[in-house]
Amino acid sequence: MNTLFGPDVYLDDIERQGYTVIHNALIADLVNDLVADCHRINPHFSLAGIGRLNNLQIDKTIRTDKTYWFDGSSQAQLTYQAIMQSIKTTLNRSFFMGLFDYECHYAKYTQGDFYKKHLDAFKGRSNRVFTTVLYLNTPEQGGELVIYKPKSKEVEITIKPTAGTLVMFESERFAHEVLPAVDERYSIAGWFRKNASISGIIDPPR
Ligand code: OGA
Ligand code: MN
C-alpha cells in the first residue's frame, strides 16, 4: 500500500474532534505521480461549479479555482482511489457510517484564486458525509485552508498546504474556506458519500 499511516493515526482524532490532519499521508512517489498527472491534464481543468448536475452554477464570487474530476485515466488516480476505498472501509467499520461511494477532483489555484467560506454538504441532499483534501505541492505563501468551529465564526484550525498532507473532516459540521492563493496550489478534494435515496430512486455517483 502507498499509505504511510495506519488507521490508529486518524480514528482517534475523528472520534474526538470530527477532523484530522495527517502529514506525509502518502509516499512521495505517489504524490509526484499525481502532480505529473495534473500537468498532463492541465489544459482540461475547468472553472469549478457549485451545486450538482443540472443545478451546477459557476459563481466567481464564491470560488475561482479550476477542477478536473477523476476519470481513472492514470495509474496514479486509480491508486489514490484505492487508498480512499480502504479508508472508507475503515471508517465504516469504526463508526458505522454507511459510506458507499467516493468522488474526487483535482483542484488548481493560481495567484488570487480563493474559495469563500462554505459547507461541502449540499442543502436538501446532504449525501456528502466526509471531506478529504490531499495537498500535492507546498506553496510558499497563501492558499491556507481555514476550518471553522461548528456553528461558529471562530477559527478551529488554519492549515498550510503541504505536499502529502491529508485533511479529513465531517462535511456537514465544518464550514471552511481557502484563502487567496499566492503561489500555484494543487490538491485533490474528495467526498465520501452515503446513499441518498429519494422516493426510492438511488442517487447515482455524481
Ligand atoms: C473544496 C475545498 C479545501 C482545500 O474543494 O470544497 O474546500 O483546502 N477545498 O482545497
Ligand atoms: Mn469545501
Image (cartoon, rainbow, N blue to C red):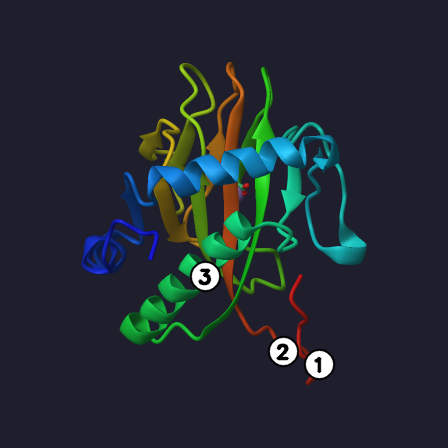
Question: Measured along the vertical axis of the image, is residue 36 above or below residue 175?
Answer: above
Packing grade of label 2 (10 A; few <14, some 14-19, many >=20) is few
Q: Residue at x 44, y 65 (%)?
A: 85
* Dot label at residue 201: 1
Q: Amino acid at mark 2?
A: Ser
Q: Gap in Å between the C-alphas at discs 2 and 1?
A: 6 Å
Outermost residue toward the bottom? 200
Q: Which picture quadrant has residue 26?
A: top left
Q: Which picture quadrant has residue 42?
A: top right
| Horizontal side, residue 175 vs residue 12: left or right | right
Q: Would you say the residues marked 2 and 1 are in contact, meaning their CB atoms lie under 8 Å apart? A: yes
Question: Measured along the vertical axis of the image, is residue 97 above or below residue 183?
Answer: below
Q: Gap in Å between the C-alphas at discs 2 and 3?
A: 25 Å
* Percent coordinates x, y for residue 76 in the rendering: 51, 48
Residue named by callout 2:
197
User: Between disc 2 and disc 3, whose residue precedes?
Assistant: 3
Q: Secondary structure at mark 2?
A: loop
Q: Amino acid at mark 1?
A: Ile
* Percent coordinates x, y for residue 9 in the rendering: 20, 53
Q: Is mark 2 within 8 Å of ligand 1?
A: no
* Percent coordinates x, y for residue 116 in the rendering: 56, 31
Residue named by callout 3:
82
User: Between disc 3 and disc 1, whose residue precedes?
Assistant: 3
Q: Gap in Å between the C-alphas at discs 3 and 1?
A: 27 Å
| Horizontal side, residue 146 vs residue 70: left or right | left
| Horizontal side, residue 13 vs residue 170: left or right | left
Q: Is residue 143 visible?
A: yes
Q: Is residue 171 visible?
A: no
Q: Residue at x 66, y 54 (%)?
A: 71
Q: Secondary structure at mark 3?
A: helix
Q: Secondary structure at mark 1?
A: loop
Packing grade of label 1 (10 A; few <14, some 14-19, many >=20) is few
